Amino acid sequence: MSIVRLLIGGATPRALALLAALLAFLVAAPAFLGPYALSVAILILYFAFVGQAWNIMMGFAGQLSLGHALYAGLGGYIAAGLFFHYGIGPWVGAFVAVAVAVLAGCIVGYLGFRFSLAGVYFALLTIAFSEFTRIAFDHWTWAGGSGGLFLKVQGGVTDILNLRGGATLFYYAILILAVGAFVLCRLLLESRLGRYWLAIREDAEAAQAVGVPVFRCKMIAIAISAALTALAGVWNAFYYNNLFPETAFAMGRSIEITLAPIIGGLGTLFGPIVGAVVLTGMGELFTDLTEHLKISGLKQIFYGLALLVIVIWRPAGVWPWLAKRLGVEERGR
């Protein structure tokens, strides 16, 4: 009962009703969505999930990471490699992948936090580790090297144990991950650790002065964030069935991970979800517009301008503005 109280504490009946309706819609969605709409819904849930993972680092603990592709890439490659070479299923491989990603996160965190790197300096450290790993995997034959690693596609056959199947299987897998991340973040925010993170985000030196274990809290934040991002990498590898170092660890992949919470609202629970809807919707709209007008680069131009407008007019994110109109503001975040 205490966990239930933490989850719904302070939520109005209207907010709970809206949340229940949204969850019911998401569970039933594959029954009435066509293949294209389902693929868009999958992308929205994926970016909501990885956005929630990155939000723990930046939105909750205030640590800017621009190298989260490191953890997604490690997660995908480790789980896919174990499956490809040894037939070890993703449910077991995910544990190994998460362990490796957490170890990498702890190394990055230890070097950054022990030497008091913050802001852009810590961000540069995360980028450097992601780039070093990309170069290493580009020459690692076990992972396929620059030629990539490809998983066998089992056409039309659903195999839950090996995460082989159609879009519906992967939709429910990423839905479970997204809902689980949302619940976890809610519990974290209501915990003592969440309050420590908030204090560190606002003023790390003041938090240290009043007895907050700043180093330990930052390490926990990067470990949890890396673990969740690694799970996203595992899902991504088995969904697309291929991995290439230049894309798995690319700077662009890291930026994609950060956009949903930034656009939706940093430090909020619904920010990454709203941001994922906005970003994916705009992306699909501009893709269709580019194909219709047949002008190369038009998608990137419109996409960038749209994001610029959102950042200028809604610097706190879309969700805080929307929440006020729905009457479901999040408390104190």
Image (tube, rainbow, N blue to C red):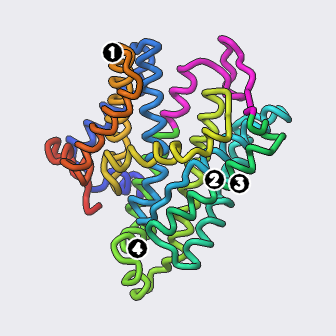
Quote the CA–CA distance across marks 4 and 2: 28 Å
**Labels 1 & 2 near each other (Cβ < 8 A):** no
**Cβ–Cβ under 8 Å for marks 3 and 2:** no
- Decide which of tag 3 and tag 2 comes sooner along the chain: 3
Residue type pointed to by label 4: Ile
The secondary structure type at the circle numbered 4 is helix
Instruction: Find out whether the residues at labels 4 and 3 contact each other: C-beta distance under 8 Å.
Output: no
**In 3D space, how far apart are the residues under numbered discs 4 and 1 (Cα atoms)?**
49 Å
Most distant residue in the left direction: 325
**Neighbourhood count class around disc 4 (C-alpha, 10 Å): few under 14, some 14–19, many 20 upward:** many
Label 3 SS: helix
Percent coordinates x, y for residue 203 in the rendering: 35, 77
Q: Which residue is mark 3?
A: 100
Q: Nearer the viewer, residue 23 or 125?
A: 125
Marks 4, 1: nearer the viewer: 1
User: Closer to us: mark 3 or mark 2?
Assistant: 2
Q: Amino acid at mark 2?
A: Glu
- Pointer 1 residue: 293
> Is residue 181 visible in this depiction of the protein?
yes
Give how far across and how far down residue 141 sits, in percent: 83, 40
Quarter of the image with the N terminus is bottom left
Residue tagged by mark 2?
Answer: 131
Residue drawn 52% across the image and 78% down it = 116
N-terminal label among 4 and 1: 4
Residue at 66% from the left image edge and 18% from the top image edge: 158
* Region in magenta: 147-176
Q: Contact (CB < 8 A) between labels 4 and 2?
A: no
Read off the residue under disc 4.
200
Depth order, front residue of 41/302: 302
Q: Is residue 246 above or below residue 215?
A: above
